[in-house]
Amino acid sequence: MTSEWAGSLLLGAVVLSGATVQRLTGMGFALVAAPALVLLLGPADGVVLSNCAAGAISAVGLAGGWRAVRPGAMLPLAGAAAVTVPAGSWVAGRLPEPDLLVGIGVLVSVAVLLVLRGVRVDALRGAGGALAAGAASGFMNASAGVGGPALSLYAVNAGWTMREFVPNAQFYGVVVNAFSVAAKPLPHLAPSAWLLSAAAITGGAVAGRALARRVPERGARRLVLLLALAGGLGTLGKGLWDLRP
């Protein structure tokens, strides 16, 4: 029982950190928490729990900003993601665990580096760019739990301000994570883990909102991305270690 609660407390701490940065910056739950959840629970359960928690915290954030959502801009993004989510789920369900860890580590690390560099790609503009970003995001979200970087790259290339990005990212997070969770079985967790995860999401929403008034936006986002890069590289290292003959 003690070990069960110790594991659940660690899980809750990971969810709390992810929920806090998600509420603070509009994205980042999966980037910060998904690599740690994958290492704690394994790729299958870790990714699905990341999808569940990211969708929940996005819904909390969206409650206060839904009027700023752009339905016309979000429809192609969400529609393309819905098409590729099943492919991501299929890949995640069939790869051996070490291969999936390597894949998740590579996807997270590369995506974070692209966002950090503010890469601009002409193909990510307009309706075609929205479809491409949504398709990439849906696949990455279902397979690795990290759909946010593709959306962030689209927003950078579309010239969105941070004020425009946050509510639309929250809306997208609700939709794409709902699709991702529906495509896979729920994770097998102890009741204490579910309870602490729910409490962590609530606590993270409160903490993130309070920090948003005090932490400079640019510095907070950079910290999130650096933490995500560390998590991605750690997951990659674990996968490569497990692949040893």
Image (cartoon, helix red, strand yellow):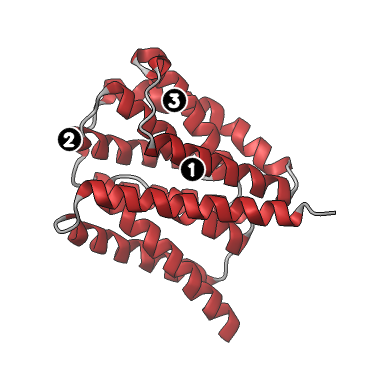
| Residue 15 x %, y % | 43, 62
Q: Quadrant of the N terminus?
A: bottom right
Of callouts 2 and 3, the N-terminal one: 2
| Residue 116 x %, y % | 38, 39
Q: Which residue is mark 2?
A: 67
The one nearer the camera, 117 or 212, is 117
Hey, which residue is sitting farthest left in the picture?
A: 213
Q: Estimate how packed mark 3 is, as few (under 14), some (14 to 19) or many (20 or more) residues with alpha carbons within 10 Å.
A: many
The one nearer the camera, 174 or 33, is 33
Q: Are marks 3 and 1 in contact (CB under 8 Å)?
A: no
Q: Answer yes or no: is residue 24 visible.
A: yes
Q: Which residue is mark 1?
A: 146
Q: Amino acid at mark 3?
A: Ala
| Residue 41 x %, y % | 61, 61
Q: Amino acid at mark 1?
A: Val
Q: Nearer the viewer, mark 2 or mark 3?
A: 3
Q: Which mark is residue 161?
A: none
- Figure quadrant of residue 12: bottom left
